[in-house]
């Protein structure tokens, strides 16, 4: 999910980084937002002078309604005139690093103002309409009494301002003597978009009926037919693919400049929300937006094709400089065509888009494993054999409904757990097996000296490190972060599974759990579900198997039911139970999955929301390296490998996140500094054993056959799996 802001986070981050540097450095960063607006941050003439340029499709419309004058008022001498504006861009600002404000507060204010570059330009027609409304209102009052009846209706309304911010979509703004009407046109080209959009917009309209929102602007939504205010315009589209959202602002909504700006920002954020969250249904943080949005990002009208890069922590030179090399030196040893393929820019509607640099070259010797596809798209394949319905076991007369269900599902009642553990303990186990099991369980344990050292290091870091307040990150506010994550640490202890539950299972083994989770990974990616859905599902499986004995033929049922529960809890549009039946090739019925859902939830006392996935901690730890995309992608791959390894069941989600981030940093040549210790609450001494176990898993001969390796061996995920495996084979032995 994209966290929407009224300002440009990229501009804010880049300028913050350069404002804080002791010595200026060159930059040449270009990016495009989802409204086809191109931005360019560069230092063409001097390291101390940053040029911020913007190319926007609707610039002629904005200029017509006073955008340049409005920008001149807001940015004063920072705004370059038309002759000095960068070629192929509409408007440019010049920031002199030698003339920055003295105080940090003033610097922050300047960064905020510059990051609102696009929003400020887009606000010009709104401010023009607000001023026009005041004039119309004054004229209307002057025409009171007998003369009021002679005022023509056309004199009560101002100019209809049309801003075509996209190829097929526009904003219509018109002032009248008592209101300002703002209309957004939007197009829904997919059936799911239309349904979801209508539901959301209708709920948005209905929300105003609440007593607490009576002062909010009036909102209406019309489908198929344009509103009356613009129906006379030529070229408007009709049909089920088109929708129109109308805001009616009264003078109280823009009574003063501060209130007017707040109203404009909220309306523009609403439009962004409609496009980004309703019409872009992507669940992976590294994924490219959905096709419905990609088709709208044509930039050919801006002239010759330009390279567009994703900003990274360090400036990337793309003009008159050398390209960044593939990390880790893996690509240097690959075939030339593989490296060239990894570096080859993509082409989208005439624009060359430089892909994120992969961590390793493409490999051709690994074939993806089959997954259970969506119905009616391909032949279904599953890694589990077909399952026959099991008959009820025993008498049902003197048992509860829960016990009856558990027997039909081939599950042992909770009360049998102790007996099974006793039988397991009394079995024939050799001294070597006991020693091996004990060593495996002890990898988290530390000596008393190490524990004292860790405690002292954590205490020193907490005493000296100060968490910077991020004014624009509403999810990681420093004022409450400590309390939030302290509460999450308490919650994660309450949902930990038994790491030795396989000891009292009678038909399944750890390898079967690995196969089940590997299959869940395939289903999760195929249905584009949220990362948290996968982690909740695996946690439900492990916790359920910790207290119930499950037969082999029902193991997949437990897995698919856990995914069903997690999807219902986490997803906005979760797959239906029929789709989950299809995932198993009809190996289980709809009734069996629904009955399994009841059993799992009752067994676990309906405790689902208490589990916080490692992604929550990864987002916090990522503050330490400014959310570096390569580190995050590599850590996500490593965490999915951890999912497959039963030795990490005893790890809390916070430690899983820390191990993944630590090993990713290690592979990329980074260190585990005080900032990482502060945000993760783990020292390097605590994380090394887990990192070593993870490297052991990466170099296993059969590791390339697991789906996680295939998934992350694509350009979309920077070929992180090939890079990690190569590092584990060559560098891990000497890393610690």
Image (cartoon, rainbow, N blue to C red):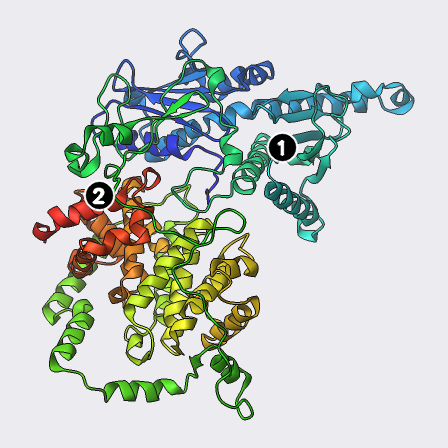
Secondary element under disc 1, as helix, strand or loop, is strand
Q: Which is more toward the observer, 118 or 199?
A: 199
Q: Within the image, what quadrant is residue 325 found in?
A: top left
Q: Within the image, what quadrant is residue 232 found in?
A: top right
**Label 1 neighbourhood size at 10 Å, few (<14), some (14-19), many (20+)?**
many
Residue beneath disc 1:
186
- Residue 467 seen from this side: no
Q: Position of residue 359 (x, y in %)?
A: 24, 39
Q: Where is residue 123 in the image (x, y as percent from the top left)?
A: 56, 26
Residue at (26% x, 55% y) in the render: 658
Residue furthest top in the image = 83
Q: Within the image, what quadrant is residue 253 found in?
A: top right
554 to the left or right of 146:
left
18 to the left or right of 11:
left
Q: Position of residue 657 (x, y in %)?
A: 29, 56
Question: Rounded to the nearest whole Å, what is the CA distance between mark 2 and mark 1?
Answer: 43 Å
Q: Position of residue 224 (x, y in %)?
A: 72, 34
User: Mark 2 vs mark 1: which is more N-terminal?
Assistant: 1
**Label 2 neighbourhood size at 10 Å, few (<14), some (14-19), many (20+)?**
many
Residue at (40% x, 9% y) in the render: 84
Q: Is 438 placed above or below 137 here? A: below
- Residue 37 seen from this side: yes
Residue furthest left in the image = 734
Q: Which numbered dot is residue 723?
A: 2
């Amino acid at each position: 999910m994209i966290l929407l802001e009224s300002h440009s986070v990229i501009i804010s981050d880049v300028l913050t980084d350069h404002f804080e540097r002791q010595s200026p450095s060159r930059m040449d960063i270009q990016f495009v937002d989802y409204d086809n607006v191109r931005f360019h941050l560069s230092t063409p003439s001097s390291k101390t002078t940053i040029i911020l340029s913007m190319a926007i499709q609707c610039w002629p419309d904005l200029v017509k309604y006073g955008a340049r004058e409005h920008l001149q008022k807001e940015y004063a001498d920072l705004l370059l005139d038309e002759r000095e504006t960068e070629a192929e861009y509409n408007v440019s600002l010049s920031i002199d690093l030698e003339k920055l404000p003295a105080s940090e507060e003033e610097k922050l204010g300047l960064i905020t103002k510059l990051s609102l570059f696009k929003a400020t330009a887009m606000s010009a027609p709104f401010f023009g309409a607000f001023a026009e409304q005041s004039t119309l209102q004054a004229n209307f009052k002057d025409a009171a009494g007998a003369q009021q009846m002679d005022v023509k209706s056309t004199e009560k309304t101002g100019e209809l301002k049309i801003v075509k911010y996209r190829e097929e979509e526009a904003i219509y703004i018109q002032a009248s003597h008592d209101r300002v009407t703002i209309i957004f046109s939007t197009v829904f080209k997919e059936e799911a978009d239309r349904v979801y959009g209508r539901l959301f917009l209708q709920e948005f309209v209905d929300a105003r009926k609440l007593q607490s929102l009576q002062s909010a602007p009036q909102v209406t939504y019309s489908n198929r037919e344009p509103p009356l205010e613009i129906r006379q315009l030529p070229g408007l589209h009709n049909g089920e693919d088109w929708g129109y959202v109308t805001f009616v602002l009264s003078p109280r909504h823009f009574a003063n400049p501060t209130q007017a700006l707040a109203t404009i920002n909220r309306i523009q954020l609403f439009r962004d929300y409609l496009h980004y969250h309703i019409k872009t249904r992507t669940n992976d943080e590294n994924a490219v937006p959905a096709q419905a949005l990609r088709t709208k990002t044509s930039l050919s009208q801006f002239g010759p094709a330009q390279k567009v890069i994703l900003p990274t922590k360090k400036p990337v030179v793309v003009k008159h400089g050398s390209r960044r090399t593939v990390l880790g030196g893996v690509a240097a040893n690959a075939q030339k065509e593989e490296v060239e393929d990894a570096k080859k820019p993509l082409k989208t509607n005439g624009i060359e888009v430089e892909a994120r640099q992969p961590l390793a070259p493409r490999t051709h010797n690994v074939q993806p494993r089959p997954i259970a596809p969506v119905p009616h798209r391909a032949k279904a394949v599953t890694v589990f054999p077909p399952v026959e319905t099991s008959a009820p076991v025993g008498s049902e007369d003197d048992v509860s409904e829960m016990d009856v269900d558990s027997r039909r599902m081939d599950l042992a009642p909770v009360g049998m757990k102790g007996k099974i553990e006793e039988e397991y303990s009394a079995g024939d186990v050799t001294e070597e097996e006991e020693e091996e099991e004990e060593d495996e369980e002890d990898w988290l344990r530390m000596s008393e000296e190490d524990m004292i050292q860790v405690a002292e290091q954590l205490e020193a870091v907490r005493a000296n490190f100060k968490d910077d307040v991020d004014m624009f990150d509403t999810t990681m506010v420093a004022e409450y972060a400590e309390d939030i994550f302290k509460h999450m640490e308490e919650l994660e202890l309450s949902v930990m599974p038994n790491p030795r539950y396989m000891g009292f299972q009678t038909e399944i083994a750890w390898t079967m759990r690995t196969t089940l989770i590997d299959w869940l990974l395939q289903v999760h990616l195929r249905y584009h579900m949220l990362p948290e859905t996968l982690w909740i599902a695996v946690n439900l499986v492990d916790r359920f198997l910790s207290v119930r004995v499950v037969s082999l033929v029902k193991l997949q049922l437990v897995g698919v039911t856990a995914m069903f529960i997690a999807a219902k809890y986490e997803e906005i549009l979760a797959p239906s139970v029929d789709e989950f039946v299809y995932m198993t090739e009809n190996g289980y019925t709809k009734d069996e999955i629904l009955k399994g859902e009841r059993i799992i939830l009752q067994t676990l006392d309906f405790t689902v929301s208490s589990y916080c996935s490692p992604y929550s901690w990864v987002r916090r730890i990522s503050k330490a390296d400014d959310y570096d995309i390569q580190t995050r992608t590599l850590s996500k791959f490593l965490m999915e490998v951890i999912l497959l390894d039963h030795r990490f069941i005893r790890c809390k989600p916070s430690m899983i996140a820390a191990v993944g981030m630590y090993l990713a940093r290690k592979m990329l040549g980074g260190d585990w500094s005080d900032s990482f210790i502060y945000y993760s609450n783990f020292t390097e001494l605590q994380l090394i054993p887990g990192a070593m176990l993870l490297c052991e898993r990466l170099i296993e001969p059969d590791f390339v056959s697991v789906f996680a390796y295939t998934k992350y061996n694509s350009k979309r995920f920077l070929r992180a799996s090939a890079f990690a495996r190569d590092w584990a084979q060559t560098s891990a032995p000497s890393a610690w």
